[in-house]
Amino acid sequence: MIRELAETATETRLDAFNRRLDQAMDRSGSLVCVGLDPHPDRLEEPMVDFCRRIIDATWEAAVAYKPNSAFFEAAGPSGMADLKTILAHRPPGRLMVLDAKRGDIGSTAKAYARAAFGVLGADAITASPYLGGDSLAPFLADPTRGAFLLCHTSNPGAGDLQHLDVGGRPLYLEVARLAAQAWNGADNLGLVVGATYPEALEAVRAMAPRLPFLVPGIGAQGGDLEASVRAGIDAAGRGMLISSSREIIFAGDPGEAARRLRDAIDTARSRAS
Amino acid sequence: MIRELAETATETRLDAFNRRLDQAMDRSGSLVCVGLDPHPDRLEEPMVDFCRRIIDATWEAAVAYKPNSAFFEAAGPSGMADLKTILAHRPPGRLMVLDAKRGDIGSTAKAYARAAFGVLGADAITASPYLGGDSLAPFLADPTRGAFLLCHTSNPGAGDLQHLDVGGRPLYLEVARLAAQAWNGADNLGLVVGATYPEALEAVRAMAPRLPFLVPGIGAQGGDLEASVRAGIDAAGRGMLISSSREIIFAGDPGEAARRLRDAIDTARSRAS
């Protein structure tokens, strides 16, 4: 049934972001998202050269890139020009997710959407849910662009709000419920779900069977990869953008690190299906 | 008792952001914060000229400015240079609050703090609470700089998360409780509380007696001004940065609009004390 619905959606709304993501996963044969977090104290070359080199070395094994806005903002106005350059360095058939965690109301959210999609040319953005559904709407107004909404994170303070009980479920599952049942009208919304707790990933998948997940926190060697893939994969055997940053970008051979992660995910996918 | 504690803090930690804010309010005689939201379709001059003109016309009646990062980001890389120019155009004794609603983890949050305080030179930033206490820590690491944490907003979707019951209180009051009791160790944390619902402002004030509030949503003519001031003011008769944007910056005479708001707040303060 879920597969039937998915196929209907593919036929009728080929261009919605979540369908573009499915196609990119199928065509690239990869669920790997490379997080571009250019820590200035770890770079021996200009930020834009570093990121272009990483993209060129990894794109055959990756389906998406996730440049982290914070590091470009911290480099000053020229960093924003660099970010635009990097987002334009999109390999064929790959997607660019701007990691910015934006969340604001009305005309301000519209301006953030214009910055991310219009000015910078990103395919998707990460967003924060605290202000509710109307604060997300500007990021979802163009169905061909998407947003990944913060749901469950892996940092020590995640539980401060996300684990609070709201009527019998933790807040992060209520965010997943709202995203799946109320906010995904244009088929272009996903969720950010950390990989550290596969049981949380499984609960979010049960609540949001068809939403794509952006899953940070998996290293190429991560023992949790198989458990995470089993817990988070959707009925079609995809639905996860598995994001790795420093384990790839600061590896001796970034291309090899990306291929290793892609292959490890493949093994986990074949065991999970 | 509260007043005694406040005085001790003033003597021993003169430079913490919240004390700097108290002093700026006392010396300027104003609680007015001018929101710099330069909507591009409403400007007839370059963004930086517009903002400088507004600051020059209003600063005698204002205590702070709140440039909205989104509008500068939407102008592209040159907009970020403009934002830096505007933040450096700080009138004597006034404070600059970067409205950016940032919220991310670990080294990313550190990079956002470096962007806001180090690169752009803001005195404070607005931040989002969904990722919990450790995501705020980088914004609070320098006690002379501050953060205003999203608590209760006035947009239609605010209730989606903020009004959810968490153990007998709405989520926004739990955010206020955490901010007041756990996260304000350096005396440089405040809360963003919309003016639309004075009863919510009153409940947040009861939960966080000594935290400064950044209160958007009040126009110069707002019938709710008196109720909001009564509900939100602290024991020392201040504790609120009352923010107005388009009612001041797009007024025929922005200086006059700022003075009118300052005077209306003064009247409300004298009636509330």
Image (spheres, coloured by chain):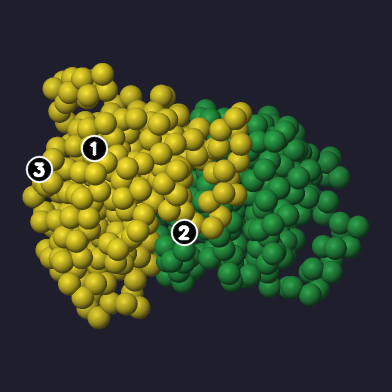
Chain colours: A yellow, B green
Amino acid identity at mark 1:
Ser
Q: Quadrant of the N terminus of chain A?
A: top left
Q: Is residue A22 above or below residue A265?
A: above
Say which mark, if any, is on residue A27.
3
Residue sitting farthest toward the front: A271
Q: Secondary structure at mark 2?
A: loop
Q: Quadrant of residue A273?
A: top left
Between the C-alphas of marks 1 and 3, the distance is: 19 Å
Between the C-alphas of marks 1 and 2, the distance is: 33 Å
Q: Quadrant of residue B225?
A: top right
State which chain disc 1 sits on: A
Mark 1 and mark 3 residues within 8 Å of each other at the beta carbon: no
Q: Which residue is mark 2?
A: B105
Mark 2 and mark 3 residues within 8 Å of each other at the beta carbon: no
Q: Residue at left 54%, top 37%?
A: A171
State which chain disc 2 sits on: B
User: Closest to the observer: A90 or B10?
Assistant: A90
Q: Is residue A138 above or below residue A240?
A: above
Q: Quadrant of residue B206?
A: top right
Residue A141 in sight: no
Q: Which residue is mark 1?
A: A273
Q: Residue at left 11%, top 47%?
A: A28
Count every numbered label the image shows and give the total. Answer: 3
Q: Secondary structure at mark 1?
A: loop
Residue A180 in sight: yes
